[in-house]
């Protein structure tokens, strides 16, 4: 049984991030970095609003939604009142608090996280459609992005034995 | 839990092969554990292993990022020294428990 499990270990993961919220981007980054740390091949593919995670000017300024986020709680554990979330500046403040807490757990800012992932051999890609749609040029993208891919090219890179595609 | 003979010494290891007793470790045991992982230990490896042991004694939460900021090696160098799972492999060879961090 043990051997069987070992033989069917995942060897390769391709992770798609289509949202630009702090938590969605970090979910993708943690999964990719965790894969690289465990010796798996990992590829990250940023599309739609997820593209912000690889746009130099925006990548370290991602925020978490304080409106329409029912799981959001205040430091005392009470639910955040809905109207409070709409006050100007609150979203930035809450997002910065989350970033600070993550830093305490050694979770780095986005650019440094991408540094870690690529240092371990992980690859980062941007979606061609999103790049065209948001009128972003290659120069706007982080140097960690190795290419801008079409869907077909993404599937080519994502395929292989014991390969998984994960959507965050 | 299991018994294992490493460098002529009988030691207790977990099912995954991590040493149970921090103090049972020595450089010869490290060399033998490294061989099992296909790694030939050099001085650079030992610098990392000693750093991990020190940090473990300080009860620090070990992460790849911490090793990268240690000044001993950068993250790329860490991956090059212990290919295919640096934190787990280095922890095993350093005689400390399996890392529990997600980063």
Image: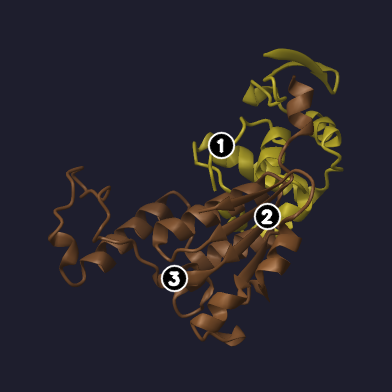
For the residues labelled 2 and 3, the Cα–Cα distance comes to 22 Å
Name the residue: 44% across, 76% down.
A58
Q: Nearer the viewer, residue A78 or A10?
A: A10
In this rendering, which labeled residue sits more in front, label 1 or label 2? 2
Image quarter hosting the N terminus of chain A: top right
Name the tint of chain A in the rendering.
Answer: brown
Looking at the picture, do discs 3 and 1 lie on one chain? Answer: no
What residue is pinned by disc 1? B56
Residue at 73% over, 36% down: A9
Q: Which class describes the residues within 10 Å of circle 3: few (<14), some (14-19), or many (20+)?
A: some
* Residue pointed to by mark 3: A60
Location of residue B47 with respect to B58 vertically, above or below: below
Q: Residue at x 44, y 70 (%)?
A: A60
Q: Is residue A21 toward the left or the right of residue B39 in the image?
A: left
Q: Which color mode does the image show?
A: by chain
Asked where in the image residue A92 lies, by quadrant, the reply is bottom left
Chain in yellow on the image: B
For disc 3, the chain is A
Q: Chain of mark 1?
A: B
Rendered location of residue B33, percent (x, y): 80, 31
Mark 2 = which residue? Answer: A42
2 and 3 marks on the same chain: yes
Q: Nearer the viewer, residue A30 or A127?
A: A127
Separation of disc 3 and disc 1 at Cα? 31 Å
Q: Chain of mark 2?
A: A
| Residue A77 at x, y percent in the picture | 21, 42
Could you say where residue B43 lies in the image, as x and y percent from the top left? Answer: 80, 49
Looking at the image, which is closer to me, B14 or A17? A17
> Quick check: do tags 1 and 2 share a chain?
no
């Amino acid at each position: 049984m043990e051997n069987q499990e070992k033989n069917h270990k995942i060897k390769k993961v391709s992770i798609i991030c289509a949202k630009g919220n702090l938590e969605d981007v970090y979910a993708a980054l943690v999964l990719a970095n965790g894969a690289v740390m465990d010796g798996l091949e990992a590829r990250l593919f940023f599309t739609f609003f997820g593209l912000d995670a690889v746009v130099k000017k925006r990548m370290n300024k991602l925020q978490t939604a304080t409106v329409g986020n029912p799981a959001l709680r205040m430091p005392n554990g009470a639910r955040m009142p809905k109207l409070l979330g709409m006050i100007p500046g609150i979203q930035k403040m809450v997002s910065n608090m989350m970033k600070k807490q993550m830093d305490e757990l050694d979770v780095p800012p986005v650019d440094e996280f991408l540094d870690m992932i690529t240092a371990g051999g992980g690859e980062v890609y941007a979606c061609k459609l999103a790049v065209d749609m948001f009128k972003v040029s290659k120069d706007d993208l982080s140097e960690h992005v190795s290419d801008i891919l079409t869907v077909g090219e993404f599937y080519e890179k994502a395929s292989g034995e014991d390969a998984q595609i994960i959507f965050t | 839990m299991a018994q294992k003979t490493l460098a002529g010494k009988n030691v207790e290891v977990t099912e995954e092969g991590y040493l149970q007793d921090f103090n049972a470790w020595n450089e010869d045991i490290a060399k033998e554990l490294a061989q099992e992982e296909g790694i030939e230990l050099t001085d650079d490896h030992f610098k990392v292993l000693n750093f991990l042991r020190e940090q473990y004694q300080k009860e620090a939460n070990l992460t790849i990022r911490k090793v990268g900021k240690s000044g001993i090696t950068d993250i790329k160098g860490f991956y090059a020294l212990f290919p295919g799972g640096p934190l787990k492999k280095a922890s095993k060879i350093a005689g400390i428990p399996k890392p529990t961090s997600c980063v």
